[in-house]
């Protein structure tokens, strides 16, 4: 607040924004808008005052001062901001209109767009290439209509090679035949079991013979 009183609006704006990042209130937003107004950011200031007023009305008596002061600031700024109307003719498929590098929404073609007084660049951005550049300088409450002709062509279809590469079915490795190892293992185990059984049977018969002979 002290920096604001001394007219050091850039310093005050920076500090108010830091406070607002921690906790935004109608009072903080009002002073941010006030500093922006003083350094020529009229469009941002206008939006700030409008939002501060809405928040102050919602808060009630704790923000009564802001609710009382904001309307006068809003009315004064509306008489100062400049504006431009963008008229777009032709075929628009993917090109965009940009003002100072910022894209203009298609819904805003033909409508008034608020701008700060001063120099501006309006251009057509087609895949990153700027064309039809128009430089203009708007005074306070200045107004201009800019007409742009667009003839976007259909984007080329991918080449046959690229299409074939994309659409080609992936090569699937042949499935190996079932392994015969388990069968061999099972068969071997069966044979071994039979052999073992024969050996134990022979030993049993021999033992019984010796037992009878001893008796």
Image (cartoon, rainbow, N blue to C red):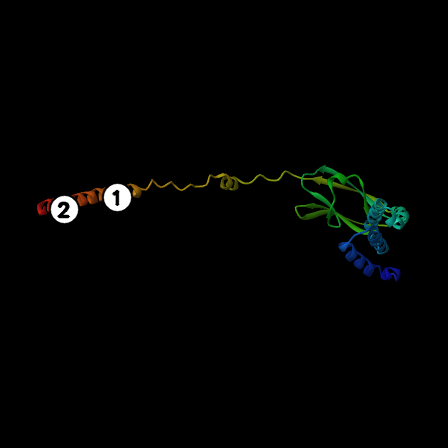
User: Which residue is the site of mark 2?
Assistant: 207
**Is there any visible trace of residue 128 in the rendered image?**
yes
Front one among 97 and 15? 15
| Secondary element type, mark 2 | helix
Front one among 129 and 202? 202
Front one among 84 and 74? 74
Callout in the foreground (1, 2): 2
Residue 193 pos. (x, y %):
23, 43
Checking the image for residue 189, the label placed there is 1
Front one among 102 and 10? 10
| Secondary element type, mark 1 | helix
- Marks 1 and 2, Cα distance to the nearest angstrom? 27 Å
Checking the image for residue 67, the label placed there is none
- Name the N-terminal-most of marks 1 and 2: 1
**The quarter of the displayed image where residue 111 is located:** top right
Badge count? 2
Residue 168 pos. (x, y %):
48, 39
**Is there any visible trace of residue 140 in the rendered image?**
no
Look at the picture and state if 91 lies above or below 215.
above
Q: Callout 2 environment at 10 Å: few (<14), some (14 to 19), or many (20+)?
A: few
Look at the picture and state if 91 lies above or below 34.
above
For the N terminus, the quadrant is bottom right
The residue positioned farthest toward the front in the image shown: 215
The residue positioned farthest toward the left in the image shown: 213
Residue 208 pos. (x, y %):
13, 44
């Amino acid at each position: 607040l002290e920096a604001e009183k001394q007219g050091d609006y850039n310093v005050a704006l920076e500090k108010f924004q830091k406070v607002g990042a921690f906790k935004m209130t109608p009072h903080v937003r009002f002073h941010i808008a006030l500093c922006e107004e003083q350094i020529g950011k009229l469009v941002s200031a206008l939006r700030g005052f409008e939002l501060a007023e809405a928040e102050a009305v919602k808060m009630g008596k704790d923000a009564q001062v802001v609710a009382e002061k904001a309307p006068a600031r809003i009315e004064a700024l509306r008489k100062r901001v400049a504006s431009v109307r963008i008229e777009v003719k032709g075929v628009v498929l993917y090109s965009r209109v940009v003002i100072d590098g910022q894209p203009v929404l298609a819904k805003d073609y033909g409508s008034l767009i608020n701008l700060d007084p001063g120099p501006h660049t309006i251009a057509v951005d087609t895949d990153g290439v700027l064309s039809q550049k128009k430089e203009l300088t708007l005074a306070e409450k200045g107004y201009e209509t800019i007409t742009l002709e667009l003839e976007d062509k259909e984007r080329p279809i991918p080449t046959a090679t690229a299409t074939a590469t994309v659409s080609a079915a992936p090569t699937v490795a042949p499935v190996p035949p079932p392994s015969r190892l388990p069968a061999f293992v099972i068969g071997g185990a069966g044979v071994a079991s039979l052999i073992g059984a024969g050996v134990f049977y022979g030993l049993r018969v021999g033992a019984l013979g010796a037992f009878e002979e001893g008796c």
